[in-house]
Amino acid sequence: MIKTDHSVINAQKIGYIAKDILQNSGSSLMIHSIFEHAVNLVDSSDWMITLLPDNYSWGPQVVILSQRDFAKFKDMGLKAMDIFNFRQLINTKEAQITYKKSIDKSISKDINKIEKNKLYFESLLCQKGNKNGLLGSDNIYSRYAAPKLKEFQILFYQQEFEEAGKKLLELIGLGPGLTPSGDDFVLGIFAAFYSIGLKTHIILKLKDIIIQNAKQKTNIISYNMLRQGAMGGFIKWVEDMANALIYEDSEEIEAAFSKMLQIGSSSGSDISAGILFGIEMCGDTPLQAGIPRCGMSPAL
């Protein structure tokens, strides 16, 4: 039962897709799942809105509440499968609308800096990353994914992008976690492709494969993440990680990765590894891209 001794909660931020979901589906939403730092709400079309406290990253399908109001919402007595009127409990009229970051094409990319950043970040990943997902050469999930990614590389290099997309699809649902490691890695690849400005027609072919087929291979939370990422929408921490590798220096890379490590258990590491892989795919030698070989114990 919902407690009746409450006032309307004022949201601080609302993602542009979350705003559209509320406009298109009305305010009746169902509680999908409740976690310590997140509450997932879903509409009748399986579009998801995630409530998060303000010490976490905003994103396209996110509504940010103050930490006090987030705790207040969780204390209302709602549970999974409950249906409630969103607007009766949460006011988003004054909330800041957050949009995905646009690519500034006027900023030139320093190839030498990107190469240096890739080497630095691979070492950082191996030192500090969670290796329970795809990260690490001795990992069972990594051993399964490696040949799939090699086939993806070859097809991508041959410009057979639809077939390449099908190889990425084979990673969906792979590994542990609420968002499986393979899903996280694929999300990172898309984040890299969008951030580095990969040609639109290539992304479109890869995007369509994921959007049309991934729902049958993973859970609804992860599918929402993948669907939005395939369309170029990511939480800010993921955007910052990709941009740091392309445009920034080691200090900014470390700061961005420290935020990524707060995402799930291995998710932040797997997304980051996917970003590194995606950036390597856009370089001069895409066939040399791969999952970081953390079994080699590199040093910074």
Image (cartoon, helix red, strand yellow):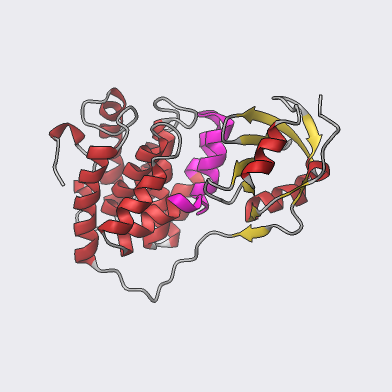
Residue 28 place in picture, x, y as percent: 80, 38
Q: What residue do we see at 80% from left, 43% from top?
A: 27
Q: Is residue 145 above or below residue 158?
A: above
Q: Is residue 280 above or below residue 271?
A: below
Residue 144 place in picture, x, y as percent: 29, 27
171 relative position to 179: left or right: left
Q: Main secondary structure of the magenta part?
A: helix
Question: Where is the N terminus found, in terms of image quarters?
Answer: top right
Q: Which residues are magenta?
A: 209-237
Residue 33 place in picture, x, y as percent: 63, 28
196 relative position to 65: left or right: left
Residue 192 place in picture, x, y as percent: 37, 53
243 relative position to 28: left or right: left
Q: Is residue 140 above or below residue 214?
A: above
Q: What residue do we see at 29% from left, 34% from top?
A: 135
Evaluate whether residue 198 shows in this view. no
Residue 26, by quadrant, is top right
Q: Front-most of 165 and 185?
A: 185
Residue 74, by quadrant, is top right
The reply to whether the magenta stretch includes residue 229 is yes
